[in-house]
Amino acid sequence: MTTATARAHPNIAFIKYWGNASDALRLPVNPSISMNLDGLYAETTVTWDEALPADTLRLNGKDEAGPALERVQRHLHAVRQHLRLTQYARVVSHNNFPTGTGIASSAAAFAALTVAAAGASGQAVPERALSTLARLGSGSAARSVPAGFVRWFTGDSHETSYAESFAAPDHWALVDVIAIVSDQHKATGSQEGHPTAPTSDLQAARVAGAAARFELCQQAILARDFDTFAEVVERDSNLMHAVMMTSRPPLFYWLPATLALMAAVRRWRAEGLRVCYTLDAGPNVHCICIREDADQVRERLWQHSGILEVRRATVGGGAALVNAG
Ligand code: PMV
């Protein structure tokens, strides 16, 4: 019996991943960029145990059966094949943030699960291989394995589709001030959403411009050029949501408070605050700002109606083992 515990942060995408070239391998149709969110994490312990008749999952203090367990079992099956293991695993995991509300809980969950599973095997698995493995559980989990500012090239096979860091967490003091406007579990998760992307007439146009936006965003981060960064991050988020809203069936993630906040953020930027918005597959608004402006953004958010909670995250490190035994 061998065990290990790992922690991984969720990440917020600046250039979004939406739609797969291969649903089975979760190969994305476009490259994406994100930063890890410090302070928020999933912590997962994996124990490989010869005596277990099947994989088990305890999530936030509750023994899971059904879809959550099955998704973890599918992922562990893939990890077993890649690491040539034969035992089943006991998985115990908890998040310190709400699941299913636009903070990408699956990214942190599958990054932590992968790193703990590999750690418990005793094998030294390189970061790149950990990132490809994490991708099989949830595409964006590939980006929660490396530290700081991360890019994920599409690749064209399991081995070539991985994420890597292109700037360390201390490269640029960005803060994600997250306005939580709903704590309901979202109706359609990204797993079911990706396959609908090609049904939108706008997806081809979004994908055609993705490489250019990726380059612009990466250069803006490397140069710490907030104006260029803000413009491309908001445009990319709007493009993804335009695809979602025009898919069949359509996916509307925005609530009235979401739209009001997007307009407010643009107004604040015009007034001189260095802040921009981006949204994942949920209604919560991620306000990405320069550290000196984060308190102002937080104060102004609280003056809006419809805000349930405001969270704040700086740039986080990569997924890592907490201990191994
Ligand atoms: O990793 P998934 O399948 O949960 O997809 C994530 C999709 C978005 O969060 C909407 C965008 C992204 O790049 O993180």
Image (cartoon, rainbow, N blue to C red):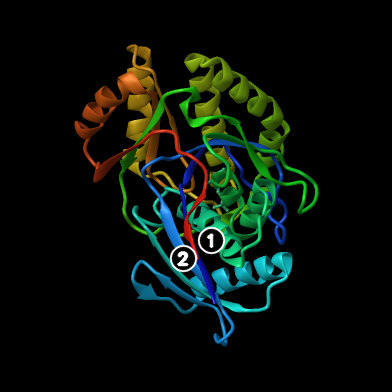
Say if mark 2 contacts mark 1, CB within 8 Å.
Answer: yes
Tell me: residue 185, above or below residue 103.
Answer: below
Residue positioned 71% across, 62% down in the render: 24
In the image, residue 207 above or below residue 244: above
Q: Could you say which quadrant of the image residue 135 lies in?
A: bottom right
The answer to whether residue 5 of the structure is visible from this angle is no
Does residue 250 appear left or right of residue 84 in this picture? left
Q: Residue at x 57, y 87 (%)?
A: 53
The amino acid at mark 2 is: Thr
At 71% from the left edge and 44% from the top edge, which residue is drawn?
29
Identity, as a three-letter code, of the amino acid under mark 1? Ala
Residue labelled with disc 1: 116
Q: Is residue 256 visible?
A: yes
> For numbered disc 2, what is the local secondary structure?
strand
Q: Give how far across and how far down residue 265 sits, in percent.
A: 36, 25
Residue 75 position, x and y percent, is 61, 67
Q: Which mark is residue 76?
A: none
**What SS does tag 1 mark?**
helix
Coordinates of residue 241 in the picture (x, y in percent):
53, 40
Say which residue label 2 marks: 45
Q: Quadrant of the N terminus?
A: bottom right
In this orientation, which residue lies closer to the viewer: 88 or 141? Answer: 88
- Mark 2 and mark 1: Cα distance apart in space: 6 Å
